[in-house]
Amino acid sequence: MEQQDGGRPQISDEEWARFSEQVARESAAAPKEPSARARMVTERLRREEEERAWAGRRRFGRAPKPGAGDPPGWRTGPAWQEREGRGRGKRRLKAAAAIVGIAGLALVALRPELVIDKLTGRAEARQEARDAGPLPAETGRPTAAPGAVPADRPTLKEPFRGSPAAQWADGAAGIEVPEAAAVGGMAKERVADALAKTKALLIASNLDPATLRGERPRAALDLLDPGQSDGRPLIERGLSAPSVDADPLWLFSRFDPAEVRVVGDVVKTRGRMSFDSGRDGEVKVHADYTFVYPVVRAKPGSDEVARTVVRRTLTMALYDPLKVVATPGKLQVVEWLESAGNDDCRRDGTGFLHPRFDSERVAAGTGPSGPVVDPYDRSGNVADMPKECATASRS
């Protein structure tokens, strides 16, 4: 290397040329910052690509794959539209959950029994009771009372809820007539007539809506022999002027229409009927039936349901007028007995049953009094029931 003036080295022309060539090569390989115009073009292309992608999703119902068509390294995170959409979705879910929660709390506040019934298993018990089929007809005296059922309040929609009667027959369907046969010198046809008229008497005196409303039970009276002094004439006197000695409740189920009304058009019925004879020219029909009446107060808008349970045993006789003094084709009363559960026992000349409601007992602060009797128990005799006013163990 040559020395320049002052002792500094002097670079030859060949070395300078090689140096310049190397610098040029390295400058060409180094990354260059895009110009302002290049950046504008790139931004425009990016926006057009995103618009095409969103248009495709709206048209075909699917979103493009993230980053499709974008230059490498262009996206380092979700686009602002995606972030905004996710946040809005989460907020909507939270708002919906809050609304559902508030509605649930309001429902529980208004109807807490929905939660209580679910927790206590009462809801399942109700469904099982609804699914249970009707009981078969009663062919003989039961040996025990019906089994316990989950205690439950009756409603206008389900007036027999919480009662053994829920599985009983409806009204007249529960009054089954046995097959007739000749007995006591009475032909089979006359026995069949006695059975049919006894069933008609039970329907007219215990199921007919007019009778239940306290109206005069003309159809029932027409079945009775007017010549029997302690039969039809006694009952007619009781209908006109009820008293301890002439009580229409011996034969009829009647409610004061100013006090209560029967819920719906179904009265539950269970019992049995048989026949025999004690002498020539006679057929006796024995009937033992329990009727369950759901009632509410007569005041409009009342919805508290109570049930009154009435059991009746009747023995009616049909006689051959050629052998026994009797009106042809008319029934005579041999025996009538009745017992009512959930009745205040006011045989005070009204001639009506008087159901009691739970709210009345609570308001009065009075508890049950008298012997406890299960009104659904059909295993005993009505004649053996307590003579004083008893307390129904259930209704």
Image (spheres, grey):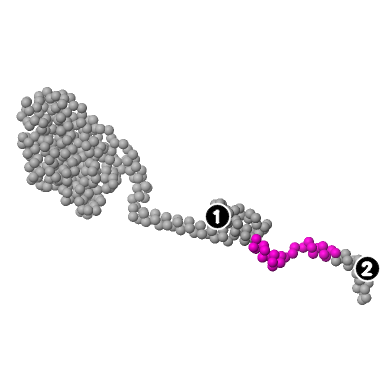
Residue lying furthest right in this view?
Answer: 2
| Circles 2 and 1 in contact, beta carbons < 8 Å | no
Residue in the image at 35% along x and 55% along y = 109
* Residue drawn where x is 5% and y is 35% of the image: 227
Residue type, numbered disc 1: Arg
Q: Is mark 2 on a helix, strand or loop?
A: loop
Name the quadrant containing residue 335. top left
Foreground label between 2 and 1: 1
Residue 344 x %, y %: 17, 47
Q: Where is residue 96 in the image (x, y as percent from the top left)?
A: 45, 56
> In the rendered structure, which disc, 2 or 1, sits on the residue that comes first in sequence?
2
Name the residue beneath numbered marker 1: 58
**Magenta-drawn stretch contains 35:** yes
Q: Name the residue under label 2.
A: 1
Q: Give the range drawn in magenta.
A: 21-45
Q: In this orientation, does residue 89 appear?
A: yes
Residue type at mark 2: give it: Met
Q: Residues within 10 Å of mark 2 (few under 14, many from 20)?
A: few
Q: Which mark is residue 170?
A: none
Query: Height in image: 179 above or below 203?
Result: above
Residue 264 higher or lower than 202, as above or below? below
